Amino acid sequence: MSDSKKRPLFEKQAQVAQAIGHPLRLAIIDFLKDGPQCVCDIAEYIGSERSNVSRHLSLMVAAGILGHHKKGLQVIYELKCPCILDFFSCMSGVLKQRVKDDKEILEVL
Amino acid sequence: MSDSKKRPLFEKQAQVAQAIGHPLRLAIIDFLKDGPQCVCDIAEYIGSERSNVSRHLSLMVAAGILGHHKKGLQVIYELKCPCILDFFSCMSGVLKQRVKDDKEILEVL
DNA sequence: ATACTATATGAGTATATAATCACATAGTAA
DNA sequence: TTACTATGTGATTATATACTCATATAGTAT
């Protein structure tokens, strides 16, 4: 790569994007936008095993998307900064463009 | 998942996020923000095999991030909508927050 | 102390992704 | 036509990811 200086930055950014690039994780983020929740409730809402949800949560913590703290037996997870929600509008932007393109193709037929 | 209606949407969104979640692909996007480029030049800039770059490009086209057209022997790829660049500010937001948190931890020591 | 609950993690498996090499295709030029 | 170049794709391998189950840990309650 010509600008190999940027490589480490791209790797960090890729980690963030990857942390968001999974249906279950997006569902978790969407759930957490209404407030902090424990693993237990997240797992029930998502409809997946707690152990599996636990792994997804750690992954997002590692990426810097979520924060967590203990509360008795439970561990409460929450969105770290509102900027995470910006991703949704970014992704919606791309998807809307996709629909627009598909329409144009159909009109030619 | 309680709101399984959202599932298909989350899957589409995850596809977009995943398409961005790779260092090489971020480098490609960063390169294309200055204008359309052929596979050949992208591969040279990125420093990876053409066949490999070609696959990364198809993946991003499938996700709706890139568009492409033929020009003689070459295939020119380009960013589809400026909204893709919004991702960079989103990811930077998360990374800045991460640095901020790390600083706070160090201050306590 | 025991019993219980929430969460995390190791091990194993299945699937997905990335990368490389070889080859096929499509367009160009002589 | 042949020779050349750019790109895409099949096959393979290596690695990463997702998931499940069983088990360990930490906190609570009796």
Image (spheres, coloured by chain):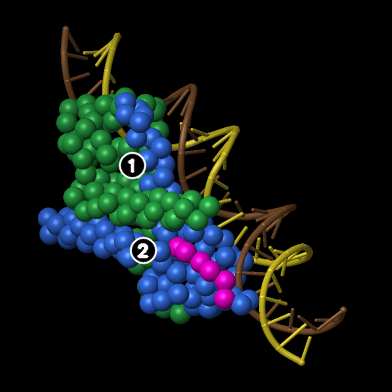
Chain colours: A blue, B green, C brown, D yellow
Provide the chain ID for the residue under circle 1.
B
- Residue A73 x %, y %: 63, 76
Task: Please state, as top left, top right, bottom left or bottom right, where the N terminus of chain A lies in the image.
Answer: top left
Does residue C20 appear to the left or right of A97 in the view shown?
A: right
Provide the chain ID for the residue under circle 2.
A
As displayed, is residue B69 above or below residue A46?
A: above
Q: How many marks?
A: 2
Q: Which residues are magenta?
A: A66-71
- Residue B53 x %, y %: 36, 34
As displayed, is residue B20 above or below residue B44?
A: below
Label 2 sits on residue: A81
What amino acid is at disc 1?
Leu
**Among the 4 quarters of the image, the one containing residue D15:** top right
As displayed, is residue B43 above or below residue A106?
A: above
Q: Secondary structure at mark 1?
A: helix
Q: Does the magenta-highlighted stretch encompass residue A50? A: no
- Residue A58 x %, y %: 54, 60
Q: Secondary structure at mark 2?
A: loop
